[in-house]
Amino acid sequence: MEENNDPLKLESKLYKIEEFGSIIRNKFGGDNYISDVILGELFLAKYPSY
């Protein structure tokens, strides 16, 4: 069974936190009152492997 190390299916590159937050918002949705920076930081705090 193949292990899925990238459930977000992101391109292998470095992202700015704003870009990462925007990707998270587009993939999962999110409150528009939360900035992309905060959304990215929250995701990285919960899933630091990214």
Image (spheres, rainbow, N blue to C red):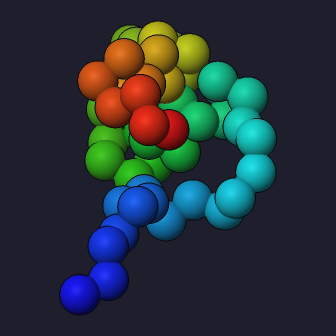
The answer to whether 14 is drawn above or below residue 46 in the figure is below
Residue 48 appears in the figure: yes
The answer to whether 41 is drawn above or below residue 6 in the figure is above
Specify the quadrant that holds the N terminus.
Answer: bottom left
Q: Horizontal placement of 18 versus 5: left or right?
A: right
Query: What residue sits 32% from the left and 42% below the top?
Result: 29
Of the pair 17 and 35, the residue shown nearer to us? 17
Q: Please give the count of numbered marks on the rendered protein.
A: 0
Quadrant position of residue 42? top left
Q: Horizontal placement of 19 versus 14: left or right?
A: left
Residue at the outermost front position: 1
Query: What residue sits 41% from the left and 61% below the top?
Result: 5
The image position of residue 30, as x and y in percent, is 31, 32
Residue at the outermost bottom position: 1
Of the pair 6 and 3, the residue shown nearer to us? 3
The image position of residue 19, as x and y in percent, is 67, 35
The answer to whether 38 is drawn above or below residue 14 in the figure is above
Quadrant position of residue 32? top left
Residue 32 appears in the figure: no
The image position of residue 48, as x and y in percent, is 41, 28
Query: What residue sits 50% from the left and 38% below the top?
Result: 50
Quadrant position of residue 45? top left
Query: What residue sits 31% from the left and 47% below the top?
Result: 28
Q: Horizontal placement of 22 versus 41: left or right?
A: right
